[in-house]
Amino acid sequence: MKSVTLLCRGTSLGHIGKLPKVKHSVIVNAFHYEVENKDVHEYLTSCSKVTHILSLGAYFPQSGARELYTKYNFDKIVLPYIEEVSPPIPTVLSDILPVENLSDVNKKDMISTPRYKYTAPTSGMDALLYIVNELEPDEVNIIGLDFYDNTGYFTNSHGRVHGESPTDIAIRNGEPTDIMQNFFKNFVISKSNVIFNLYTTSDFTLDVKNITITKVVK
């Protein structure tokens, strides 16, 4: 069985020790402070391949983001945009690792917003599309996806202050909870051939056979 783990940035990430080990993990956006957590570091170290889904607005080299790529077995950076709507790929990234856009195969699962003709509500959701549609696993483990549901980020890696990020900052930098939850529900239901294991602090529920939800304490 091919399993891939998706590491998002919500506070449930602190429970990464509950996840089974996999060969391939995908991380989302600024992650340089997250890996200072011993359990997160050890989990990624055990992976033979790590892919980074990185929004261009979430690269903070002045805070240590560039050094992140020296620590684990990264294969590439994937921008959370299909080529049709993507900003230019900056040289500063392509000098570090191969950089590519999301494949057009993801269009069928995307939504349209005033900013993008094709997109997902958040980079975390873009990463989920990438994993399922492009890596084609049998099983996806997901942690750190808390839907901004009464919780913030695990750390403040997206900004300049080291430490946990409060809920208001998380929501300001993301989408409303209901938009994310509805997108996630529809996607999981549409991919009935894939097993999803979600570890979350959210009260999110979904009663379908292909998802197991484990509620963890913030």
Image (tube, rainbow, N blue to C red):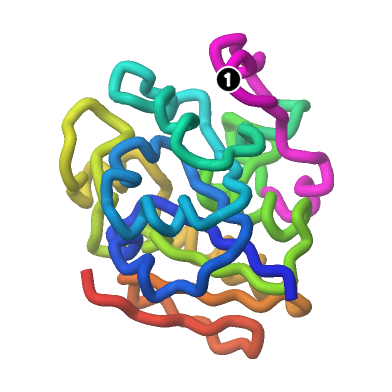
Residue at the location (25% across, 53% down)? 152
**Residue 100: in magenta span:** yes
Q: Position of residue 106 (x, y in %)?
A: 76, 48
**Residue 103: in magenta span:** yes
Image mark count:
1
Determine whether, in the image, residue 178 is placed left or right of residue 95.
left
In which image quadrant can residue 32 be found?
A: top left
Residue at the location (43% across, 58% down)? 43
Question: Do we see residue 148 in this rendering?
Answer: no
Please state which amino acid type lies under the numbered disc 1.
Ile
Structural crowding at the residue carrying mark 1, measured as other residues with C-alpha within 10 Å and reported as few (<14), some (14–19) or many (≥20):
few
**Residue found at the very far right of the displayed protein:** 105
Determine whether, in the image, residue 137 is placed left or right of residue 202.
right
Magenta-drawn segment: 86-110
Return the residue at label 1: 96
In which image quadrant can residue 77 be found?
A: top right
Determine whether, in the image, residue 162 is placed left or right of residue 72.
left
Residue at the location (23% across, 75% down)? 217
